[in-house]
Image (cartoon, rainbow, N blue to C red):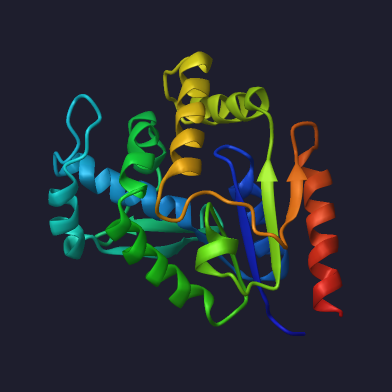
Amino acid sequence: MKRISIAIDGLSASGKSTLAQGLAKALNYIYIDTGAMYRAVTLFALREKLIDHDGNLNVSGMVEALPRVYLTFRFNPGSGRSEICLSGRNVEKEIRSHEVSRHVSVVARVPEVREKLVLAQRRMGEVGGVVMDGRDIGTVVLPEAEVKFFMTADLEARGRRRFDELVRRGRSVSLEAVQANLLERDQIDSTRDHSPLLQAEDAIVIDNSNLSIEEQFDHMMGCVQQVLHA
């Protein structure tokens, strides 16, 4: 059976990663979490003191430091998925902090950051047999992907999902703060000049505000199987 590329884009906390991981596991494909890559760069920027207390990024310092940003994915048998490593060290837990979430959009809108990561993502996806999720996968990174999905949900549903996720990780944060962060990220992601969040014209749109994970997975797998058996 042919091996294809699957692109999944959408809003923050719309369930992209959960579904992407499920599809990759079912198809025995490689899952690439591009959002984790941007979060890892943000973690690097925070560690290097390139983001001040007001959330302002030292852009020139970020660009100058980019050659020192070394990202890889390493399979974790415990979680059953590939996890992001920064300079060879697994930082999967650290990048999910509220502090990283607060600043990731500021880092992600720097053109040089996006150029570096998009190039790496294209190299990962060009062989096929991948499920890649993010915000510009179907429009910029893998515009020729055989199957494209665009995930969306209302703010209440997305806020609750992200809040529950952070609580499970032991984070102390309010639902209101989480929703405010999502609104800010939506605004930044949709209006940035370089590779804004856009729905690809040929993407299958899934509003999962009131859909279970199982319902979403069955629908998406059905769409993939149609292409695989065409």
Q: Is residue 106 left or right of residue 197?
A: left
**Residue 91 in sight:** no
Tell me which residue sits at (40%, 48%) in the image: 92
Tell me which residue sits at (20%, 60%) in the image: 66
Q: Is residue 46 left or right of residue 108?
A: left
Tell me the quadrant of the picture where the N terminus can be found: bottom right
Residue 213's quadrant in the figure? top right
Q: Is residue 143 left or right of residue 172?
A: right
Vertical placement of residue 142 versus 53, above or below: below
**Residue 182 picture location, percent across and down:** 50, 29
Vertical placement of residue 81 versus 175, above or below: below
Tell me the quadrant of the picture where the C terminus can be found: bottom right
**Residue 20 in sight:** yes
**Residue 158 picture location, percent across and down:** 62, 30
Residue 155's quadrant in the figure? top right
Tell me which residue sits at (44%, 56%) in the image: 83
Vertical placement of residue 193 versus 203, above or below: above
Tell me which residue sits at (45%, 68%) in the image: 121
**Residue 86 picture location, percent across and down:** 29, 56
Q: Is residue 218 left or right of residue 3?
A: right
**Residue 62 picture location, percent across and down:** 18, 51
Q: Tally the marks.
A: 0
